[in-house]
Image: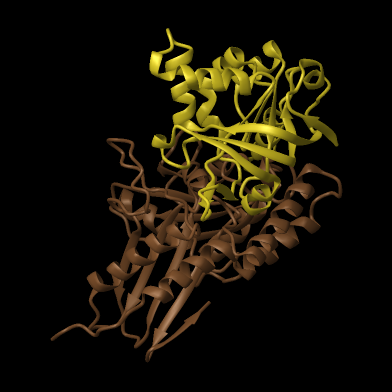
Amino acid sequence: MHNLTLPISEEQIRQLRVGDTVSLTGTIYTARDAAHKYMVENFIQGEPPATEREMLAELEQGLSGGVIYHCGPIVRKDESGKWHFVAAGPTTSIREEPYEYQVIERFGVRAVIGKGGMADKTLQACGDHGAVYLHAIGGAASLIARSVVEVIGLFKEEFGLPEAFWKIRVEDFQCVVTMDSHGGSLHKEVEALSERNLQEILK
Amino acid sequence: MNPVKIDLRESLLELVRRASTQLPDDVTRSLHEGLLHERVGDAAASALKIVLENVALAAEQNTPICQDTGTPIFVIHHPFGYSQRAIAADVEWAVITATEHSYLRPNAVDSVTGKNSGNNIGSGLPSLHFHEWEQEEIRIDLLLKGGGSENVGGQYALPSAPLSAGRDLEGVRRVVLDAVFKAQGKGCGPGIIGVGIGGDRPHSAWVAKEQLFRLLGDVNEDSELAELEQQLLAEGNRLGIGPMGFGGATTLLGVKVGAAHRLPASYFVSIAYLCWAARRASLTFNNGEVTFA
C-alpha cells in the first residue's frame, strides 16, 4: 500500500505502477461532467471571464499536485448548515475523456479518481505530465463517504448538487492504480484478454 | 364508482428506504459466492470484499448503498377499483420525501435547460408502470436502476453481419456476449444482464428491463430460454473481465432473458445491464396490511 498525502509530487507519482493500491489523505475536489466542461470552457479555451477569477484561483491553488474525484455525492446539511457526505462512490470516468488531458495539463493534477477507466488521451496525459488514474470501487458509496472526514467547500452549486465542485478532506481513501505514468493501463490489458476469450468462446 | 381510498405514502417511503440501503439477499449471496472464485490478494477479490463491506455498512448506518440512486422504476399491480392517479401521487410524495432524507440523490435533470429539479420529479420520473390484475392485493416492485450501468446497455437489430448474428437464439447469444464484452467494467460489474428479444424498439427494451426484477435463482419457464440464461452466465464469466473490470472470474451474477412477439420484419435484442448494486424491493398491500420483501 502506498500512502499518499496531498499535495503529491511528480516523483511520488512516477513510482506508482498499475495494480498498486494507494491510500490517499488530504484535500481533494469532486468534479464530474458539468465541472469538467466548465473548467475547459472558462479556463483553457480562452481568457477566463472576470466573474470566474475567484474560482480559477481556488482551482489553481487546490489542484496543483492535487486530485480530482469523479463523483456526484449524496449530501446532507445539518442544523448548523454544515454539509456532510452520506454516499459518495465514483462515477463513470470515460465521460470526461474529452476534457481530462487539458485539465491535468492546465492545473497540474496528479491523480484522477473514478471508475471504469479512461482512454488514450488521458493515458497520454498521465505520461506527459506525471499523473495516475486511480480506480475506486464503484457503488461502495457508504464506505467511501466514511473516509470523507470533512466537507470544506461547495462551489458552483448552480450545477446541481451532484455536479457541483465539492472540496473535501479525505483520510485513508483507498484506490487501485489502473493507469500509470509509464503507459500502463489495466483496462487495456483486460480488454485485450477478454477479446481473446470472446473469440475463443465464439469459435 | 369511486376508487377505493388508500394512503400508501409512508409505506412507499419505507419501500424506497429499503431499496436504497439494503441489498437483496440473493444478490448479497451471489457476491459472496463470486468472492470464493477470485484469487486471494487479487484486485478482483479486494473489490468484492469492499463491495460486501459497503453493503453491510449501508444497512447498518441506514445510508444509500450507492450514491447514484438511479431511475426509480415502480411496477404496480393492483386490482380493479383503485385510482392510478392517486397511487402515482403517493409515489411522488414518497420520492420527494426520500430525497429530502438523503435516501435518493436528486437525479432528475431537464434535458433542455440542464436544470436539476432537485426532488427527483420530472417528465418520465419516477418511472411508473401500472398493471391491473385479478389478485386482491396491490403489489409494488421498485428497482433503483443506476445510470452508469444504464449507459452500457444497448439494442441490436438482427441480423448483424459483423457479429455473425442471425435471427435465432444463437444470434441472441452472440450479441449478448458482444454487449458484455463492450461493457467491460464500466457498468460496475459484476453485472446482471436483462435481455429482451422481439417487440418493437421500446417494448424490446422494456422486456429487457423487466427481467432485472427477477430473483437471481429463479428458473425461466421457457426451457430454451432457461438453457440460454445458464449458457450466457457461464460464457460471460469466461470472458475474464471480472469485478470492476479488474480481471477475474466474476463478470456476471446473472442473465435473465424474456421474449415478446415481433413483426416479421424486425428482430430486436435489447440488453439492460444492472450493476452489482441491484437495489430492488417490494411491498404488498392487502386488507390494510403492508408487508415488505
Residue A59: x and y in percent read: 56, 22
Residue ranking furthest to the front? A80
Q: Measuring 60% from the left and 13% from the top, which residue is drawn there?
A: A105
Colour in which chain A is shown?
Answer: yellow
Residue A171 visible, this orientation: yes
Name the one closer to the observer, B62 or B250. Answer: B62
Residue A193: x and y in percent read: 71, 34
Residue B47: x and y in percent read: 73, 48
Image height of A202 relative to A189, above or below: below
- Name the image quarter holding the N terminus of chain B: bottom left
Describe the colour scheme in one phrase.
Answer: by chain
Residue B96: x and y in percent read: 37, 60
Residue ranking furthest to the top? A47
Q: Is residue B96 shown left or right of residue B57?
A: left
Q: Measuring 44% from the left and 24% from the top, which residue is drawn there?
A: A37
In this rendering, the count of numbered labels is 0
Instruction: Please give the letter of the chain rendered in brown.
Output: B
Name the one closer to the observer, B168 or B119. Answer: B119
Q: Is residue A171 shown left or right of residue B103?
A: right
Residue ranking furthest to the left? B1
Residue A201 visible, this orientation: no
Name the one closer to the observer, A105 or B236. Answer: A105
Image height of A203 relative to A58, above or below: below
Q: Measuring 47% from the left and 71% from the top, which residue is drawn there?
A: B15
